[in-house]
C-alpha cells in the first residue's frame, strides 16, 4: 500500500504527517518505557521491524499509484501493542523509502497512518475481542493479521480517493480504488494470516517468558507450561 | 531475493559515488527542499525543472552509472504512467474534455481528470529523482548522524540502527538458506518450491532472532548501554553550495508563484 513518492499533492501529505506523528510520538514514549524495563526485548523488537520491512517489500504492483503486499504490522501489534507497532512500521517504511525507493519521504505520513496505525489498531482490537470470546489462539492471530492487513488497504483506498475524487464523489472513487486493490490483496491477506499463526506459535514456544514479561498480552497458559518444562 | 540485491546495490552506490565525501547536511538540505517544492507545486513545470537538475547532478557530479539510474527509474515510471493514465480516464469531474464512443458504451473523460493525471505523473517523477538523489549519494551512516544532530529521540535512532542491521542479517540468512536448499534439490518443482519456501520463511525467523540475540549478548558483554556511538566527523557544508541551493529554491518558488494561475 506504499503510496509513491509525490503521489499525494500539497495539503494532503502534510495532513497525514501531522496525524501520524502525534501517534508515533506516543509510540516512542511506550517504546522507551518498555526497553528501559526490559532491554532484552530489543532484539525481538528489531526483528519485528525487520520482519515488517521484508514482508512489505514483497510487493505486487497495483495500478493505483501504489502496490499490494503483506504488511506484517498486525503481528507486531498483537505482540507489542499498536503504539509500538506504529513506531516499528514507520522505521520500516523510512528504510524502504531510503533503500528501495519504495514509498517515499513525503508520503511517509500517509503510509504510516495506513500500515502503522489503522492496521495495527484493528488487528489489536480483533485480537482482544477474540481473547475475550475465548477463541483459540490461532484463530485470533489469523483474524487479527488478515483483517489488519485488509484494513490497511481500506485506509489507503480512502486516502487516494480523498485526493482523486470522481464525478460521483468521494465514495465512488473509494470503491474504485478498493476494487482494484481487492484483486491482489485478499489472497495476500489470507497468506499473511497463515504465516502469522506459525510465527506466533514459534514465538510463544521460544520466547514465552519474554512475551509474558512485556505484559502487552497475556499469553495462553500452554506457552508458560512449555517454558517451565524446558 | 531481488530486493535484497537492489538494497545492496543502492547501499554500495551511497558509499562509493563521487559526492560521497561531500557534506551530507548539504545533500539532505538540497534533496528535501527540492522534494518539498516539487510536491507542493500545483503545475508540472517545477517538478520537470527539479527532475532535470537532480538527474544532471546525479549523472555528472555524483557519477552514478546511467544504466543503473535508469534501471531504478524504469519500474516506478511504468507503474506511475499506468496509474496516471487510469486517473486521467476514470477520475475527475466538471468540464468534460472528450467522449469515447464505442458501439457498446460511451465514456466521458473530464478535463480535470486529465490535468490531475498529467500533473501527478510529473510530480511523482520530480519527487522520485529527489529521493534517488538522497538515497544514491548519502549513506545510511551519515543519515543516522544527521538524525542525531536533529535531536530525534535516542531510542528511535537505536531501534533504527538495530532494524537496519537485522534487515541485512535477514537477507544474508535467506540467501544462504536458499542456496543450501537449491543444492539439496529444493525449489526443483512447483510443489517442492512451495514446501521449500514455507520451510525457508519459518526458519528464517528463528535463525535471524538467534543471530540477533547473540549479537545483543556480545554487545552487552562490551558494555552496551543503549547508546550506539558513531564518530561524528562529517565534512562541514560549504557556504558556496548552500548559497547555490538557496538560490535554486528561490527560483523554484518564483516559478511556482508565476505559474500558479496558468495551470
Image: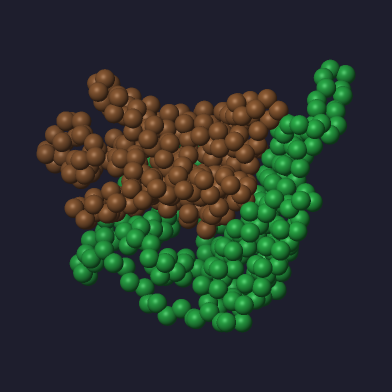
Chain colours: A brown, B green
Q: Is residue B53 above or below residue A169?
A: below
Q: Nearer the viewer, residue B243 or A209?
A: B243
Q: Nearer the viewer, residue B29 or A223?
A: B29
Residue B226's place in the image compared with A203, above or below, is below
Please indicate whether residue A215 sits to the left or right of residue A91 in the image.
Answer: left
Q: Position of residue A36 (x, y in %)?
A: 21, 56
Position of residue A108 relative to residue A129, above or below, is below
Q: From the viewer's perspective, is A40 left or right of B6?
A: left
Horizontal and vertical percent position of residue B195: 44, 35
Quarter of the image holding residue B79? top right
Q: Which quarter of the figure has residue B95?
A: top right
Q: Residue A106 at what x, y percent from top left?
A: 55, 52
Q: Residue furthest left?
A: A228
Residue B151 showing in the rendered view = yes
Name the residue rendered at 54%, 44% in the picture.
A2
Q: Residue at x 42, y 49 (%)?
A: A21
Q: Nearer the viewer, residue B23 or A192?
A: B23
Residue occupying the point 85% across, 28% down: B99
Task: Identify the residue at the far top of this view.
Answer: B104
Amino acid at each position: 500500500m506504499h503510496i509513491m513518492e509525490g503521489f499525494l499533492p500539497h495539503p494532503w501529505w502534510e495532513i497525514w504527517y501531522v496525524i501520524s506523528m502525534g501517534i508515533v510520538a506516543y509510540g516512542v514514549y511506550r517504546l522507551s518505557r518498555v526497553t528501559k524495563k526490559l532491554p532484552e526485548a530489543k532484539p525481538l523488537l528489531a526483528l519485528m521491524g525487520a520482519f515488517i520491512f521484508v514482508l512489505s517489500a514483497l510487493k505486487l504492483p497495483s495500478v493505483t499509484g501504489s502496490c499490494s503486499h503483506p504488511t506484517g504490522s498486525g503481528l507486531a501489534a498483537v505482540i507489542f501493542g499498536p503504539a509500538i507497532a506504529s513506531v516499528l512500521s514507520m522505521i520500516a517504511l523510512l528504510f524502504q523509502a531510503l533503500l528501495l525507493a519504495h514509498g517515499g519521504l513525503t508520503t511517509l505520513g500517509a503510509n504510516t497512518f495506513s500500515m502503522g496505525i489503522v492496521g495495527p489498531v484493528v488487528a489489536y482490537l480483533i485480537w482482544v475481542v477474540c481473547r475475550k470470546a475465548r477463541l483459540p489462539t490461532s484463530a485470533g492471530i489469523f483474524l487479527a493479521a488478515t483483517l489488519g492487513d485488509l484494513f490497511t488497504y481500506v485506509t489507503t483506498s480512502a486516502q487516494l480517493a480523498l485526493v482523486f475524487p470522481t464525478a460521483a464523489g468521494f465514495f465512488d472513487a473509494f470503491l474504485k480504488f478498493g476494487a482494484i486493490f481487492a484483486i491482489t490483496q485478499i489472497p495476500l491477506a489470507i497468506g499473511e494470516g497463515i504465516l502469522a499463526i506459525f510465527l506466533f506459535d514459534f514465538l510463544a514456544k521460544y520466547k514465552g517468558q519474554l512475551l509474558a514479561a512485556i505484559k502487552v498480552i497475556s499469553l495462553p497458559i500452554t506457552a508458560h507450561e512449555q517454558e517451565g518444562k524446558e | 531475493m531481488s530486493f535484497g540485491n537492489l538494497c545492496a546495490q543502492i547501499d554500495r552506490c551511497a558509499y562509493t559515488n563521487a559526492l560521497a565525501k561531500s557534506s551530507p547536511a548539504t545533500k539532505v538540505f538540497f534533496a528535501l527542499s527540492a522534494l518539498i517544492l516539487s510536491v507542493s507545486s500545483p503545475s508540472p513545470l517545477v517538478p520537470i525543472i527539479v527532475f532535470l537538475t537532480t538527474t544532471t547532478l546525479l549523472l555528472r557530479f555524483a557519477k552514478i552509472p546511467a544504466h543503473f539510474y535508469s534501471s531504478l527509474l524504469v519500474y516506478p515510471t511504468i507503474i506511475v504512467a499506468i496509474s496516471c493514465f487510469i486517473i486521467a480516464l476514470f477520475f475527475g469531474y466538471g468540464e468534460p474534455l472528450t467522449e469515447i464512443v464505442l458501439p457498446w458504451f460511451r465514456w466521458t473523460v473530464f478535463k480535470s481528470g486529465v490535468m490531475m493525471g498529467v500533473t501527478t505523473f510529473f510530480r511523482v517523477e520530480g519527487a522520485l529523482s529527489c529521493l534517488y538523489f538522497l538515497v544514491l549519494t548519502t549513506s545510511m551512516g551519515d543519515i543516522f548522524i544527521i538524525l542525531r544532530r536533529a535531536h530525534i529521540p535516542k531510542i528511535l535512532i537505536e531501534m533504527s540502527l538495530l532494524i537496519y542491521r537485522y534487515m541485512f542479517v535477514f537477507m544474508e540468512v535467506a540467501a544462504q538458506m536458499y542456496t543450501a536448499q537449491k543444492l539439496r534439490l529444493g525449489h526443483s518443482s512447483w510443489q517442492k518450491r512451495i514446501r521449500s519456501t514455507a520451510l525457508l520463511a519459518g526458519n528464517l525467523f528463528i535463525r535471524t532472532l538467534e543471530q540477533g540475540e547473540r549479537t545483543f549478548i556480545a554487545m552487552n558483554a562490551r558494555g552496551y548501554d543503549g547508546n550506539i556511538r558513531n564518530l561524528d566527523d562529517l565534512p562541514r557544508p560549504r557556504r558556496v553550495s548552500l548559497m547555490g541551493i538557496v538560490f535554486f529554491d528561490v527560483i523554484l518558488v518564483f516559478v511556482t508563484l508565476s505559474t500558479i494561475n496558468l495551470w
